[in-house]
Amino acid sequence: MSILELKDLRISYASSEGRLPAVRGVDLHVDRGEVLGLAGESGCGKSTIAASVLRLLPKDAEIDGEVLLDGEDVLTMGWTRLRAVRWSKASIIFQGAMHGLNPVKRVGDQIAQAILIHDESASKESAARQARELIEQVKLPARRARAYPHELSGGQKQRIMIAMALACGPELVIADEPTTALDVMVQAQILDLLKGLQSELGLATLFITHDLSVLTEVADRIAVMYAGKIVEEGPAKQVFDKPKHPYTRALGSAFPEIGDWSYRMSPVGLAGDPPHPNDIPSGCAFHPRCPVATAECADHEPRLESVGPARSASCLLLEPVQNGQMA
């Protein structure tokens, strides 16, 4: 049984132009102990999905579908139950560590506070001790528990955010672009830390980023989003090395592959911008930017269909696969 299942998830926001669709019918699952990478450009709906799992969306958001956390629909939970599952069943590592930490409280106290809220049997002393142990688990000295956020580097703050996400022993961790604001060397250290913790603790992880090359290092599977929908899904290495959807191919080409001199050292750009949520093109939403689009792509919206073992993609130019045979 999957720890997380999204079924026909649809999310929109209020605006002066009417409702803006951010997520348009997403089906997705994360199995226990698995790392699922969710990739796509800014504005495609990745962070909206992350926030929906723990119902952290703004009040103007409208949400339909199902968000099943260990088989229980988060969208129908009462406040008491929702408060109980946050951080203990699933937790989130936010994109900007500085925005996720209280600047006037010591970081150890902030971790301990999460423990005290969710564990009624914990004392202040035991919570403080657990906080120091968690800080050591993310490869920082325990004495950093007494530091304020401004006394820590960007990488150290992100490690504290990871420690906080682990404070209540969740089964699922959502990592929303946890390395975006960090330099390359610190990014590598944080990725190594996350991989080590995932393996050690058996965590299921939803890892969100715009960088496909990062996901090949940490993810078991990758799902690629464009304009609020999943356009491709499959095993991480296969999706990166042999993408089926033209958008996945373009997204992977946007990053240089270091160490392979026979390949590119300069990234290849993709013309145009993602569509505005209020002006999504007819047919395939990607067709105005697609280098291989045909006239049919503007008139017919493709469905996400099987295109190989454990592979799916939504492109009219692909032949669907049925029972392992080309249709």
Image: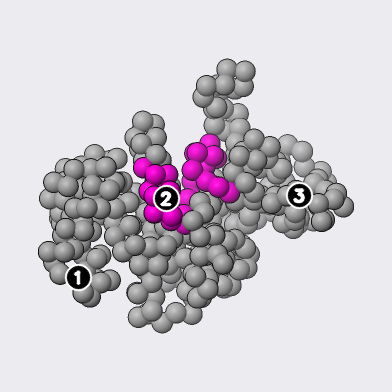
Residue plotted at (72% across, 56% down): 304
State which region is magenta. 193-221
Residue bearing mark 1 = 122
Residue 178's label in the rendered image is: none
**Alpha carbons under labels 2 and 1: distance apart:** 25 Å
Give the answer, above or below, for where 113 lies relative to 290.
below
Residue plotted at (35% across, 36% down): 189
Q: Quick check: 233 left or right of 4?
A: right
Please, what is the three-letter code of the amino acid marked with disc 3? Answer: Val
Q: Find numbered disc 2 in the image and state the secondary structure of the residue it sits on.
A: helix
Residue bearing mark 3 = 307
**Alpha carbons under labels 2 and 3: distance apart:** 30 Å
> 2 or 101, which is in the foreground?
2
Magenta stretch encompasses residue 210: yes
Give the answer, above or below, for where 137 lies relative to 260.
below
Please, what is the three-letter code of the amino acid marked with disc 1? Answer: Ala
